[in-house]
Image (tube, rainbow, N blue to C red):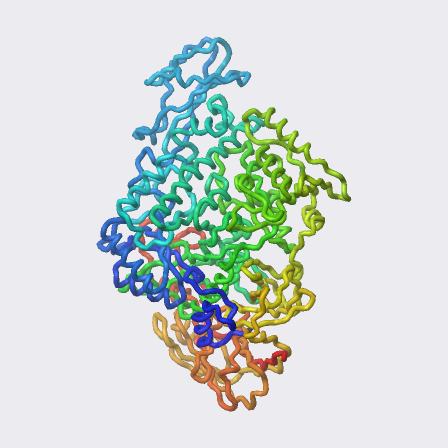
Amino acid sequence: MKIKNIVSLSIICFTFGNLSAQNPWPKETNTAQPWTRWWWMGSAVDEKGLDKQLTTLSKAGFGGVEIVPIYGAKGFENRYLNYLSPEWMKMLQFTTTKAKSLNMGVDMAVGTGWPIGGPQVSEQDAATKMIIQTYTIQPNEKFSEKIVLKDEKQKNVKAAKLDIVTAYNEKNEAVVITDKISGDGTLNWKPTSGTWMVYAVFIGKTLQKVKRAAPGGDGYTLDHFSPNATKDYLKTFDKAFGNSNYGIRSFFNDSYEVYNADWTADFKEEFKKRRGYDLSPYIKYLVSDEEGEIAGRVKSDYRETMSELILHHFTENFTNWAHYKNSKNTNQAHGSPGNLLDLYAAVDIPESETFGSTKFDIQGLKRNVEDINTKEVPDINMLKFASSAANITGKPLISNESFTWLTEHFKTSWSQVKPEAEQIFLSGINHIFYHGTTYTPADVQFPGWLFYASTNFVPENSLWPNIKGLNSYIERTQSVLQSGKSDNEILMYWPVYDQWASPKGKDMAFKIHNIEKWLHPTAFYENLEKLGKSGYSLDIISDKMIDEAKLDHQNIQVSKEGGSYQVLVVPQLNFLPESTLRNILRLAENGASIIFQSEPRDIPGNFEVEKRRNEFHALWNKIQFSQNGNIKSATFGKGKILLTSDVSKGLEYLKIEREKLTDTGLKFVRRQFDGGKFYYIVNHTSKEINQSIPLNYSGKQIALMNPENGDFGVTTAQNNSVKIQLKSGESIIVKVSENADNLIPKWKYIEKTDVPIVLNQPWNLTFKEGGPELPKSRILKKLEPWTNFSDDALTQSFSGTGVYTTTLDLKNKKTDDYQLKFDKLYESAKVIVNGQDAGMVWSLPFEINIGKYLKKGKNTIQIEVCNLMANRIRYMDQNKIQWRNYHEINFVNIDYKPFDASSWKVQPSGLDGEIQLIPLHYSK
């Protein structure tokens, strides 16, 4: 692909928002730019530092920040500001005012550290758990033991109290004896015969405190299931904010990481109201290790109740409060013991999260095993829970906490970030937040203040001079992915009751860190993987969404603002509520197409099982299937229902087409806008794709748009196919429009290349910025990294910018363009030709088009290379120069052990191998 000069690039960035006839890019907004999680360490911020860092972020192409106060740096305690104090609110107001002047947005967390909580959380509102004690009563025995809470940790907890007491005999017959316990714990009940086991359930507190809290933010974590706890918690913000939202775009809540919170004070009343029966006689099945049918049914009801409580008592209250403040809210639902789809859908901006590193087949992509977390790999289908909820319900923005622990500290290059960002985009997410950036006071030296679990998107990073290349790429891509709405054809039902009905365990949290347990081993996941790779686009739907769905021209639609889908697929499952089956048949009757991969085995839950089971079978028997080869089909009202183990065959039968471009190995995501569709296409294969690819959608005009440099041009389609040229690691946007614009220029395809000119002449190497000191300049007979020169110790410890300069005598310019191709680049570069800024090289393949800057005769080529921070950090640790000195966790490595870079190998830095100048000829 062609990378134009940086001057042209900046003009395109400024003008692609103007919907002129010549420019097919969507309108520019600050939400299209990447945002970053902005940690305020100790909230030790001041106006000078805030002004400096916001200005720096804006110049680098960031569209906004998300403020999260955390623990502070030692030695700066006198600068700490207490969270939500008048002084803190003054700094917040300065931040939002300054950001607005820079056309940036500001979000903030509703708490410090994580999970949500703080000093305003009373013992009553704190995260709650059930504490089980068991007693045995023998026949004719006088039971004298007091049924009182024995847990020493709870002895000072005033909210701790007895909630349920149930006795079971050897036949598992239950007697609820809660009212037989006097105030001092005396049991006023005696069985007539047999041995009885007594289960006593106490309401206790987890006593978990906020993790990584900032000054003024320490305290208990919140009870998400209480009807009042969230409302009580947010009153502190009402007091601090008054009638203003202080310019906050969205209030953010981090992922649910509350441990052992499996109860709330009025749980048994809520359970009876929602499930239709008293839980007390079944408490044994909930808390014991029994794995029979009753245990599975009771636990399913318990988990469903937990899901409803966190949805209605926390998430919806949080959303309503944010709207009352004339703001939006952002929530990470993952990790919650609830239906993730419904929790994501209940907020304005659903946010997912990626953690770790993905293995891509991209040629030359660095992925050293010693520098990555091999236990966790981002999963595109996990990300789809957030994007599906947004797509179905019509939320325009889907965000993602991105690049957490992508590699070991100081070893992440922008070329490694790009494919991870692309995978996030391919999941349907369109609003990336970097994880992240730490506020650093102006008087703190290199490497500044740093957060322990991040990719360091900080101005002190030696790669910072070229971050605008990455940010511009993300901005252009997100401008497309935030346009119109998603264009997926399949709804895939998530059989959450198969998870909830497991007789193992008790509460069930759906975490990104344990998807190998609840997601990967399912037919549901297998279908997501298979259909996605074969070229189908899909979203995941919940029971609640199916209940709200209607038909729109025989397509299924949950919200007018959301997507419209051709088919609902119900994957192989065991449990399906009769209410959901009834809703599915309602959709079919009105014209929907449905595919069942298998006949559901049963209904979940323990309420009136036989009655509901009979209702379920009666509903299922309404479907009169007939055999069509390997597929059973039935006309149902205006719609059609299929039963087939092969979902792909069912989709073919219904004539629902896949995008065959995936047969080449390409990946894509599709958006529809008024008058056409966008295809965002990525080549993560190891090969170059230079061919025509088929598209299901055809229009009057096709424009190709390069998100890396902003280039665009129209091309022609033949038989609904469009020619693309993508090298390994590249991407392209295809815009198919119903209306033709004759003012858009023609796309330039490379028709052929001439013999490359190898730049094997001498080079000058100098250093312009970085540290600990600048190495000495030298003349190179051949290109090589500056870390090869062991005669100068500074070359081993230097992190910053090295400048390679040479001259080239070009005898003629009888070609359309010239491509400068790098063999090895550590890690990114700015190219200057004859004194003119030609652009940045920061992603694979490492190449840039510079023909417009070359002239016949003598040319000067200057390459400013930025390397990783790693070598300088290694030097500092070897020389015991203190730079990490924080409260709380301080600073750890990727394995969560104390960080020490002193034994690291020197990271190669600069240029290596050949640099070629390749003459290009474009097709006419």
Q: Of 860 and 3, which appears nearest the observer? A: 3
Q: Position of residue 18 (x, y in %)?
A: 45, 69
Q: Of 16 and 236, which appears nearest the observer? A: 16
Q: Position of residue 384 (x, y in %)?
A: 53, 50
Q: Quadrant of residue 97?
A: bottom left
Q: Of 443 and 352, which appears nearest the observer? A: 352
Q: Of 336 and 559, which appears nearest the observer? A: 559
Q: Relative to residue 500, is residue 886 depicted above or below?
A: below
Residue depicted at 49% across the width and 84% down the height: 762
Residue depicted at 65% across the width and 59% down the height: 696
Q: Quadrant of residue 755?
A: bottom right
| In this picture, residue 871 sits left or right of residue 587 | left
Residue depicted at 69% across the width and 42% down the height: 642
Is residue 212 in view from this perspective?
A: no
Q: Relative to residue 658, is residue 323 depicted above or below?
A: above
Q: Position of residue 717 (x, y in %)?
A: 65, 68
Query: Which quadrant of the rendered structure holds the N terminus?
Result: bottom right
Q: Position of residue 652 (x, y in %)?
A: 70, 51
| In this picture, residue 497 sits left or right of residue 162 | right
Is residue 393 in view from this perspective?
A: yes
| In this picture, residue 780 sits left or right of residue 488 | left
Query: Which quadrant of the rendered structure holds the C terminus?
Result: bottom right
Q: Relative to residue 810, is residue 430 depicted above or below?
A: above
